[in-house]
Amino acid sequence: MASVSVFGTGYLGATHAAGMAELGHDVIGVDVDEAKIERLSRGEVPFFEPELPELLRKHVESGRLRFTTDAREAVDAADIHFIGVGTPQKKGDYGADMRFVDAVIDTIAPLLTRPSVIFGKSTVPVGTAARLAARVRELAPVGDQAELAWNPEFLREGFAVEDTLRPDRLVLGVDPERPGRAEEVARDVYAGILARDTPFLVTDLATAELVKVSANAFLATKISFINAIAEVCDATGADVVQLADAIGYDERIGRKFLGAGLGFGGGCLPKDIRAFMARAGELGVDQALTFLREVDAVNMRRRDHVVQLAAQSVGGSLLGARIAVLGAAFKPNSDDVRDSPALDVAGRLHLGGADVRVYDPQGMANAAALWPTLTYAESIDSAVKDADLVIVATEWNEFRTADPGALGALVSKRRVIDGRNCLPVDAWRDAGWEYTGMGRHAG
Ligand code: UDX
């Protein structure tokens, strides 16, 4: 069993740290945010992620997992370091903000006095790993014996523990000119996962970086493809859900990520496709990714579309209309509201003069921090009370399974826009609701 450190304790880093402890390693998680480290040290997860609280508590209690703000303590304790800090979109620019990754490297490299391997997990512009590897060699007292490899992470929020412990594949990028010990160390660290015949692909650094952004670009493209088709369905009276079922049976296409609706959001897909385009521009191959602009545009149009539908539904003007928005998180089983289509729609309706009430099973605190001027309700019932329109913007189970009859008794008008095509249409229509889905029999 190895001693490892994980720098960054957000959705990715905290889950990776707990996952490494579950695989049997001694783990030290590091973050500059003292409040976060304090909570994690008490065995508390500072965000909503199913299964993670149990896993974290188990290993904090066993002593196999601890947290610190002191990078030196982590470097003293371990010779294997994972970097899982964020790479958000730069302000006013499509590119990725690399300052957190750079800061970790500049902090730990000068402390490396023993042979060490750093595994980058953050999503970064292609070319970053080669640059950082050279910087590590330059700054580390141990010189060439401080190695850096890239090991992208594919975890989905809401399934982060599952994806960490049972990933579809592991990808490791190493410098073919200096392969070093990274592969051997990775095989050792991930032995528990590899024992289940999980595919393990060893590539060069650039390929590993590109695998991650390409995967996200593909997923975003798939969602925008079906949303573009939803626009055509709306214009023709066709049904995009049946269409997706039908094309999804073709194994070459597959049904997953063909959910038409409000489109994608969150901390990854939107900023990753933008950073990918920005990097392609720098590399002189911007034309190769021009289509991602359209993917982004189709995605943003979904939000406009729902706002327009809402205005139509309440008689043309949003002014004074009481609208319940069910959902604030960018997807169910998450409290993450970063670039959330649900919250974006709620905010736009509010700015348009509607009296908006938002309810989300987990995302309310984060939503209130981002949009303090919106009104937040404590339950579905209080959100929909006297509403002229209900919009389902995130497909939480609680909304899917809500009783349309009971909700119908609370609202002022039985009008629902199903922004995620997640409601049982017949049950809602039978209960007297005027139902509008996304790309399905508009009328
Ligand atoms: C994504 C990738 O899936 C993951 O592999 C990567 O590591 C990080 O980015 P995540 O952001 O957690 O993960 O969410 P994901 O489940 O991919 O959903 C992204 C967005 O797409 C959500 O807003 C979701 O509502 C939307 N979506 C997804 C659709 O609109 N339709 C679909 O059919 C699927």
Image (cartoon, rainbow, N blue to C red):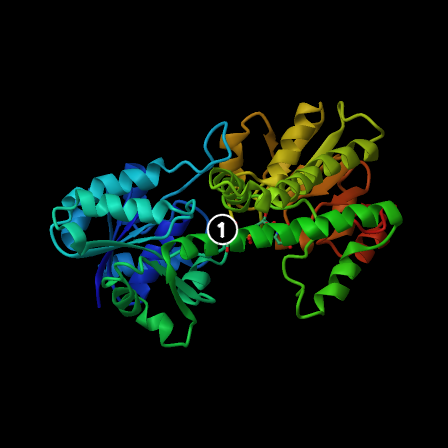
Residue at figure coordinates x 20%, y 48% from the top left: 137
Counting from the top left corner in percent of width and height, residue 224 is at 67, 48
436 sits left or right of 9 in the view: right
Query: 236 or 211: which is nearer to us?
Result: 211
- Where, by quadrant of the figure, is residue 295 drawn? top right
209 sits left or right of 61 in the view: right
Query: 75 or 365: which is nearer to us?
Result: 75
- Amino acid of disc 1: Val
Residue at figure coordinates x 70%, y 41% from the top left: 302
Counting from the top left corner in percent of width and height, residue 327 is at 62, 43
Counting from the top left corner in percent of width and height, residue 372 is at 54, 27
Name the residue tied to disc 1: 213
Number of dots carrying numbers: 1
Whether residue 155 is visible here, answered yes or no, is no
283 sits left or right of 412 in the view: left
176 sits left or right of 313 in the view: left
Query: 232 or 180: which is nearer to us?
Result: 180
